[in-house]
Image: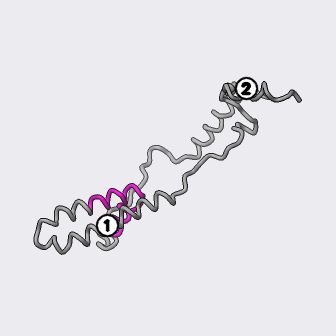
């Protein structure tokens, strides 16, 4: 190593001090936006977006709509509305399932672990298994 760990710690602390100087003062409170009476259609749209933002929220919403359809089916008006609500709930569940299949998961790229431009290995070497040892015995030396 070029530097000792003490030098690296000092460097990190100096950078942290520089970043603290750039941050806003603690005495001031950030201003919050004042609540305004807005368009009710926008408020409804925001609520719908929150309920459909993730596949999990969409699936819960679909299950709740299906439960509401079941509860409504015992009323005279519900006999007309419950099939429609059940279809909407089923569509939400299906949409949540499709969105979860199509969602891209962030996967770390395989490769060496780096710290400050140097390769580090923090994992102990993997022990060879029984089959690996047998294969090595059967292969002629190179």
Residue 56: percent from the left, percent from the top? 39, 55
| Relative horizontal placement of residue 27, taking residue 135 as reference (left or right) | left
Q: Colour scheme used in the picture?
A: one colour
Whichever of callouts 2 and 1 sits on the residue coming sooner in the sequence is 1
Residue 62 colored magenta? yes
Question: Circle 2 sits in a helix, a strand or a loop, which is it?
Answer: helix
Which residue, as the protein is rendered here, is positioned at the far right?
142
**In the figure, 73 relative to 129: above or below?**
below
Q: Quadrant of the C terminus?
A: top right
Q: Nearer the viewer, residue 9 or 60?
A: 60
| Range drawn in magenta | 44-65
Q: Quadrant of the N terminus?
A: top right
Residue 91: percent from the left, percent from the top? 35, 67
Q: How many marks?
A: 2
Q: Could you say which disc has been placed on residue 134 in the image?
A: 2
Q: Which residue is mark 1?
A: 36
């Amino acid at each position: 190593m070029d530097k000792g760990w003490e030098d690296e710690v000092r460097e990190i602390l100096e950078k942290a001090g520089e970043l603290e100087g750039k941050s806003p003062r603690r005495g001031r409170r950030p201003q919050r936006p004042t609540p305004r009476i807005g368009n009710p259609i926008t408020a409804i749209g925001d609520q719908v977006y929150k309920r459909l933002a993730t596949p999990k929220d969409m699936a819960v919403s679909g299950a709740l709509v299906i439960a509401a359809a079941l509860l409504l089916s015992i009323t005279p008006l519900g006999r007309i509305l419950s099939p429609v609500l059940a279809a909407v709930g089923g569509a939400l569940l299906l949409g949540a399932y499709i969105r979860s299949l199509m969602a891209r998961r962030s996967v770390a790229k395989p490769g060496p672990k780096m710290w400050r431009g140097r390769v580090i290995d923090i994992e102990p070497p993997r022990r060879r298994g029984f089959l690996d040892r047998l294969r090595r015995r059967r292969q002629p030396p190179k």
